Amino acid sequence: MTRDWNAAVGAEMGLRYERGVALVTVLWLLVLLSTIAGSYAYAVRTEYSVARNNLQAGKARVLAEAGLNRGIVERLLPPGADRWSIDGTAHRFRFGAGTITVRTQSATGLVDLNAAPPAMLGNILRAVGVAAERRDALVDAILDWRDGDDLRRLNGAEARDYRFADAGYLPANRPFEYPGELALVLGMQPQIYRRLRPFVTVYSRRAQVDRNLAPRTVLLALLDGNVDAVEEVLATRAERAASARQAGQVGAAGIYHVNVEATLDDGTTATLAAVVSINSEPEAPYSVLDWREGETSQRAEDA
């Protein structure tokens, strides 16, 4: 009987052990399946988020292009029409599922990198907040870039300096071909370039700046930082601009920097900057001289 009892107890313990192993196995399988399901759901959500962001970014870019086209059309309106100003004033309007801000700036109101004298280059650098000790070096480096010789100015930079800095390129020793080339000048830090870029051009080909079309920062450079004088110029200019628009005398032909920011209702933003030449030929009323797309930013929860 004892033997039978031991056999029965052993069988019961074996059965319990098998059931325990089976239970643990099932639990591990459930954990594994849950992990797989969770990973798949996360992957699907991530792909959906990426696809949605790409879609919204595409919409924002298209909206920015619509703003650019609107800015061009404003310059092509017939004589007598109430055109937008060309002094960089922001014009904001709703279109589709977003808001577009367009700034049209005549090239004659900007500092020409190839024609501006050293003093003007220094003044615009000061107007955007560049310290005095860095201004002299940047002015000379800009002049060394645009001239045709290898003679280094006192604080400038020529081929030897670019090699020593391991820049990977040499100064052009010719006039700037497009405004973005300014970023290559030795000593031009990215933050300085970003502040300076909206106020320079290579398309006016004038040493002097038209103060009637210059934005506030350029006026500060022209008027040696005199804020009161700048405000007086802006007030007078606003009155003249209003009268000119009423009389339909705002000019069209010329070269313009058009900067566009498009923001969708969900916060997705895209920027676009182009330089457009308005011509008098009916077959080709305008041409795009430069095109630069900025980074598209998403709303915080999707970034």
Image: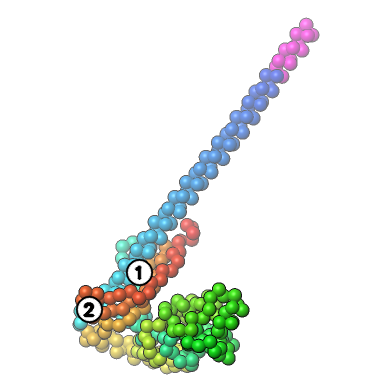
Q: Name the residue under label 1.
A: 100
Residue 87: x %, y % from top left:
35, 83
**Mark 1 residue crowding within 10 angstroms, few (<14) / some (14–19) / many (20+):** many
> Which numbered marker is on residue 59?
none
Q: Is-magenta flag for residue 133? A: no
- The residue tagged with tag 1: helix, strand or loop? strand
Whether residue 126 can be seen here: no
Q: Name the residue under label 2.
A: 281
Question: Left of 13 or right of it: where is 131?
Answer: left
**Mark 2 residue crowding within 10 angstroms, few (<14) / some (14–19) / many (20+):** few
Question: Left of 38 or right of it: where is 291?
Answer: left
Kind of residue sitting beneath label 2: Glu
219 or 162: nearer the viewer: 162
Most common secondary structure along the magenta stretch: helix
- The residue tagged with tag 2: helix, strand or loop? loop
Task: Determine whether 45 is above or below 55 in the image.
Answer: above
Report how far apart the C-alphas of labels 2 and 1 lie in the structure. 29 Å
Whether residue 47 can be seen here: yes
Residue 73: x %, y % from top left:
26, 74
Mark 2 or 1: the one toward you: 2
Q: Which residue is drawn at 46% across and 50% down?
A: 47
231 or 144: nearer the viewer: 144
The magenta stretch is 1-13
Task: Determine whether 249 is above or below 180 in the image.
Answer: below
Question: Left of 133 or right of it: where is 95?
Answer: left
